[in-house]
Image (cartoon, rainbow, N blue to C red):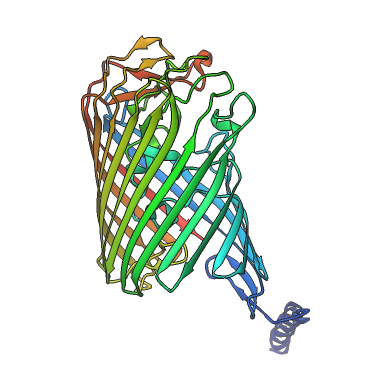
Amino acid sequence: MIRKHFAGFAASALALAVSAQAFAGTVTTDGTDIVIKTKGGLEVATTDKQYSFKLGGRIQADFDSFDGFYTTNNEQGNEAYFRRAQMEFGGNYKDWRYQINYDFSDNRGNENKFDEATITYTGFAPINIKVGRFDPDYSLEKATSSKWVTTKERSAILDLASWTTGHENGMGIQVNGTTAGMFYGSASIQQQDSSASLEDEDGKDVNSYFMRGVFAPIVSETQVLHFGVDYATRSYGNERDGTKFGGAITSNLGVRGVNENNGLNTAAMTLAPNDASTTAGNTTTGFEDDEVVGLEFAYMQGPFSVQSEYLKRDLSGYGSNGDREATGYNALLTYTLTGESRIYKLDGAKFDAIKPMDKQYGAWEVFYRYDNLSVEDDNLMVNGTTAQLLALGVDETEAKVHTLGVNWYANEAVKLSLSYLMTKTDENTVKMQHAASPATAGNSRYLNGFDDDDGQAISLRAQYVF
């Protein structure tokens, strides 16, 4: 009995000794006290908010199943992949902010994997000046983070002018800010680097100019009214080999998996192919000036919201070459069955997360979106890869996408999404298949003989944000 009590006493003494070692010492600072938060990543900041850093990230695992127009053989195809696997590190040193986001997924191929790498000066409040690598500020849907955008993939109308919303590898400078509690604006100049094959024979890159203005007369936790206008422009010279910008307009029609493996079993839609007769020294083909305008609208009342965008792109032809015009519009309806409202931030003029009120069952959101895309072009196009004349004589090509889906916000970190897409295209739309042979690496060829003009897809995503 004595040995039993002694053993218990010894175990307790050992536990106290270990505890004493674990809690030995104190944490001190050389200035203001600090606050450490571990909910949603790791955040450390001084109480006066003069210094901080935060480590976080996102993982998005996707699966797409598709058929009809979405595949080269009009049969069923599928693809599973990591859409994003990002580490995010940012913070501030007094009036200076920094942000570095690096994507470890394979979806960018050989592209620059820095989603963002910026330094921002905030000392001229409410004006901010940002320099570095960042996405253009264009479109309400693009401004909303991929973590909290309602649909798994953003609207297909943004594909009509992908350079206004896509990942530009070049550097840029942006000025943005808010005022009067209802206005937001930004303006930027961004340089696209030579990886896009737009650098001319003198080494000059293409400079892109962006402006976005937003008027939000109502901004509260449960009600938002948002109006916005966007503008972007750039001009093209001769490329390095003297050829002209071809102006191809393609889209995955809301299903990223159709080209994720860059193989032969899937296809993308070509609303307008490259003006591939733009041979070196030919001054009568290709396109010169590129201009895009857009309009934004959103209204939210409690758990219900509606948003819509319009985009128009004008490509001016070189010399006697004709012009090309692309237009698109969408409408998105959302309703949160569990009663939560979407968070809206005037700084950036964007929607943000939905935070579940019920910690056990989370928040449930249903949505429907309609996308309409069209391109008008009277020029006859030549496929330079296969040297075959495409009998397009395109007056207008058109595509329509219906997306119906549900999001489950299990908690503030986990989100599961399910979407069903139905697509309809017209007879002038061409499918483009990625070439696989070494001789044509990096090129594409247009498919004939597969005449499906509609398709459907099921898309799923499992997301973890920290």
Task: Please give left or right for residue 212 compared with residue 199 in the image.
Answer: left
Q: Residue at x 64, y 80 (%)?
A: 48
Tell me the quadrant of the picture where the N terminus can be found: bottom right
Residue at the limit of the structure toward the front, as seen here: 319
Q: Residue at x 64, y 73 (%)?
A: 45
Q: Is residue 269 visible?
A: no
Give x and y (percent) for residue 2. Answer: 72, 90
Q: In terms of depth relative to the viewer, which is nearer, 166 or 421?
A: 166
Q: Is residue 300 above or below residue 1?
A: above
Residue 273 picture quarter = top left
Q: In terms of depth relative to the viewer, which is nearer, 375 or 303?
A: 375
Q: Residue at x 34, y 56 (%)?
A: 150
Task: Please give left or right for residue 287 compared with residue 296 in the image.
Answer: right
Q: Is residue 136 above or below residue 415?
A: above
Task: Please give left or right for residue 78 compared with residue 190 in the image.
Answer: left
Task: Please give left or right for residue 122 compared with residue 380 in the image.
Answer: right
Q: In terms of depth relative to the viewer, which is nearer, 164 or 186?
A: 186
Q: Is residue 307 above or below residue 361?
A: above
Q: Residue at x 47, y 19 (%)?
A: 436
Q: Is residue 29 visible?
A: yes
Q: Is residue 202 above or below residue 125?
A: above
Q: In terms of depth relative to the viewer, which is nearer, 454 or 209?
A: 209
Give x and y (percent) for residue 228. Answer: 36, 58
Give x and y (percent) for residue 389. Answer: 33, 11
Q: What number of labels is visible?
A: 0
Give x and y (percent) for residue 25. Answer: 78, 81
